[in-house]
Image (spheres, rainbow, N blue to C red):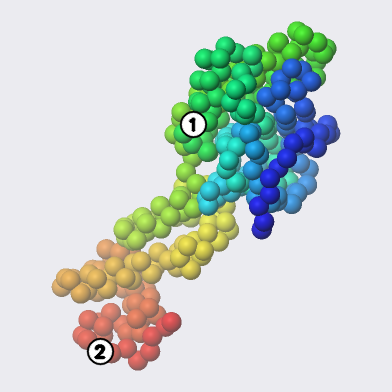
Amino acid sequence: MGNSVCTLPFEYVDTPERRVLNLESDGLSCIPALGYSHYTSSRPSVSEHLHPGCLELSLCMRGSLVFECGGHAYRLLPGNVFVTQPDEWHRLSTNPKGLVMYWLFFRLEPASQDILHLPTAESDVLRQTLRSLPHHLFKGTDRLRQAFQRLFRLYDEMPAGTLRSLTMRGAVLDLLLALVEAAQTEPEVPEVERVARIISAMREHPQGDYPTDRLVREAALSPSQLTTRFKQLTGLPPYTFLLACRVRSAQELMRATDKSVTQIAQELGFSSSQHFAMQFKREFGLTPSAWRAGQKPAFRHP
């Protein structure tokens, strides 16, 4: 997939499914696009791109979507915020049916231009703060959601003129300050890292209980998505991988201790010593007792 630079102006539309508004005519030259998406059907993903000079902010209200940025996949759930800086390549890899999302592009360049007609010192501080937000993905707040809703309401209900421009400028400033405030919360962990943590826990504590509903909750994925990601990272679905971890741990216990096969099976959470023996033979080509006795396997699974 080739990289591309997303140039301005945007394709401005105003439909029930997609609103892309240009606020420059309201004196907000820093807002080339204010957007709202409410898809009644899925849409194709977009190519990896960047927006020169513009910070991109997305607030997911409904649905589940995935942003790819810097080699990571970030899953946005309702209430999550995702931010990309002007020099970061990224793409929205899913546009699912039922998606509801607010989004905004904010011009940070040129650096010599004051933001929202603020005094130069305040403008410089705000620009630097936005440029150094600590996370890409984090939880949104009611204040941020309400700031988006207020911007659209002002655009729709106030007559064009100086008062609307002044009011909308204040609303944009409130939105940016709400974004800065929300960014200080604990970040959402990228999808791959969430699954990797589960994998590490299984390796380190194979005797633990890992019910599907708990794994789905920790990974913030559907059962099918969790299985797909597990296969990508380990080659095995979750339960099969857990069994493999338990068998490997059992092998180490038999090598290092005098514990009985039954005792080891119980400690590692196998339903019975027979179940353990079956899994062990499938992995190593020998029963646990035969392996401990030093016999050579008759076969070995690849």
Most extreme residue toward the front is 112
Q: Secondary structure at mark 2?
A: loop
Kindly identify which numbered label has been placed on residue 253: none
The amino acid beneath tag 1 is Ser
Graded by Cα atoms within 10 Å as few (under 14), some (14 to 19) or many (20 or more), the crowding at tag 2 reads few
Q: Nearer the viewer, residue 237 or 150?
A: 150
Most extreme residue toward the left is 258
Most extreme residue toward the top is 163
Quadrant in the picture for the N terminus? bottom right
Graded by Cα atoms within 10 Å as few (under 14), some (14 to 19) or many (20 or more), the crowding at tag 1 reads few
Quadrant in the picture for the C terminus? bottom left
Residue pictured at 37% horizontal, 57% vertical: 200
Whichever of labels 2 and 1 marks the residue nearer the N terminus, that label is 1
CA gap between label 2 and label 1 equals: 61 Å
Query: Which residue carries the number 2 mark?
Result: 295
Query: Which residue carries the number 1 mark?
Result: 132
